[in-house]
Image (cartoon, rainbow, N blue to C red):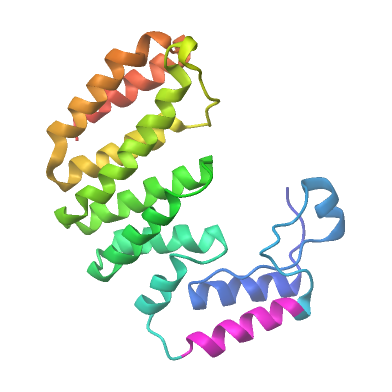
Amino acid sequence: MKRTALVNEYVIFVINRIAEHNFYLPPESDRTQRYGTPNPARPTNISELELQIRSWWKENQTKSLLERKIEDVNDPIHDNRFAAYEWFGRTKAMEGRDPLEQRIDALLTGQVDSLKQTEMAACAEALAQIGDSTSAPTVRKVCNHLSYWLSMRYRPKEEGRSAGWSNQIGTMSKAYRALASLGFKDEALSRLEDFKSRYLGEMDTSVQEEFLKEFESAKTW
């Protein structure tokens, strides 16, 4: 969809780039009706948006980018959390280890959904990029969690199955790749091989093809 950008939309785009933190304009009423209810974490009017930015600036104007990214690991808006995970992985900042590991522990509690699973895999990937092998136990927790919930889709029917989410195989593969990158490649491949022997036969043909593609790729890690 293309349309003329409003001045305030352009301004907030520039502010987001300068701050390396995302703020959001209120959705237009017609777009809300067409595309669903707006995120409750987002402001509902321009005054609220201005207050959001001013409040953030008051709290963060003296903080370094590193300090701000540590806080963004737990930001209410998921765009900022994912940007923080990516930043720590890209910069290999060791200061990100504890926040990322604590974030994974928080994600492992409570309800399970696809966003939480995607987030914990992204955190595991960032820890692997930082490269400290002492993060392996936490990354292993992510592998265990993702393997369990994917297996729940394909375990024997008499034991009861659960519904799955999109891209579960790719998400699980990302976590095992992180484990391999931290120096545990043999373990990662062995566990994927075990998963394959247990559940491949229960998968639909298209899902089998997706899993086998990921498994062959894993051999090159």
Quadrant of res 64: bottom left
Residue at image point 86% right, 59% down:
29
Asked if residue 23 is positioned above or below residue 195 in the image, the reply reads below
What percent of the width, then of the height, locates residue 217? Answer: 26, 28
What percent of the width, then of the height, locates residue 216? Answer: 25, 22
Outermost front residue: 159
- Front residue of this view, candidates 126 and 34: 126
Q: Is residue 20 left or right of residue 127?
A: right
Residue at image point 73% right, 47% down:
1
**What secondary structure prevails in the magenta region?**
helix
Quadrant of res 168: top left
Q: Is residue 173 left or right of residue 166?
A: left
Q: Is residue 209 left or right of residue 42?
A: left
The question of residue 190 being in magenta is answered with: no
What percent of the width, then of the height, locates residue 20? Answer: 48, 72
Asked if residue 213 is positioned above or below residue 118 in the image, the reply reads above
Q: Visible in this render: residue 216?
A: no
Quadrant of res 198: top left
Q: From the image, which quarter does the C terminus lie in?
A: top left
The magenta span reads 48-61
